[in-house]
Amino acid sequence: MLMRITRACFDIVFPPSKDMLLVRRAPLHALNPFITPRAVGNVVALLPFQEPLVRACIHEAKFHHNTKAIKMLGLALHAYLTQQERPVVLIPIPLSRARLRERGYNQVEVVIKEALTNLPDCTLINNVLVRIKHTTPQTKLPKEKRRENVAGAFKIREEKVSKLRGTHIILIDDVVTTGTTMNTARSTIAQCSPASLTCLALAH
């Protein structure tokens, strides 16, 4: 009761956004019925971004470190990963140093960590792919400018290459639009000669 009163008072002072309210009112597994993996070019998209709750979770996880949104996305990713029939290495698309300092976290990495519960054959490796170019967010650019924006944006830590050679990799981002960022990162990771390389976006 006290918690409800405290939250009500807090909401009066700091009115919650529509996205925050959607996440707050949803059950933890509410995204799972929307899991519909489909190909977007070379990328597998897990959830439909046009679904309001999916969009709310992506925004809340990305911009506000909303722990419930992260948990919900993690549960959806977990459901997908349980279908893997072999050990896989999970690599999040990295942020630039500037954006990581600004935000304080990589939302894709924290979602992956949330998803890894009881998945012993899935391993997160977050220090192999590095973003060396601070780029304009792709959503702010016209389609014809996006490839130029991310050209040369990534590199591999040479001392980590042996960790990936011959492994099955899933490269993960939160949202795919044209797939330009993911394809650029994919080309960089391919230098490590993995046994397979899947590009996965939480939403499209």
Image (cartoon, grey):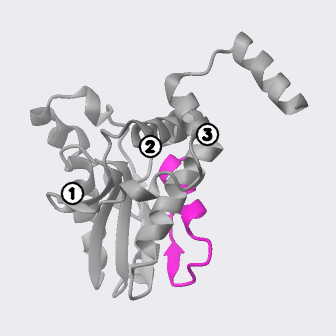
Query: Relative to the observer, which residue lies in front, 186 or 72?
Result: 72
Going by the picture, which residue comes out furthest to the right? 2
Which of the 4 image quarters holds residue 104? Answer: top right
Q: Which residue of the protein is positioned furthest toward the front in this rendering?
A: 1
Q: Is residue 161 left or right of residue 149?
A: right
Residue nearer the viewer, 95 or 120: 120
In the rendered view, tell whether residue 32 sits above or below residue 6.
below
Q: Secondary structure at mark 2?
A: loop
Q: Is residue 181 left or right of residue 109?
A: left
Amino acid tagged 2: Ser
* Number of numbered markers: 3
Whole-percent x and y of residue 22? 53, 33
Q: Which residues are the magenta region?
A: 106-127
Q: How far separated are the C-alphas under marks 2 and 3? A: 21 Å
The residue that label 1 is drawn on is: 183
Say which amino acid is labelled 3: Asn
Q: Nearer the viewer, mark 1 or mark 3?
A: 3
Please report the residue visible at 28 percent of the width from the left and 85 percent of the height from the top.
Answer: 195
Asked if 174 appears above or below 86 in the picture, the reply is above
Secondary structure at badge 3 equals: loop
Which residue was labeled with disc 2? 96
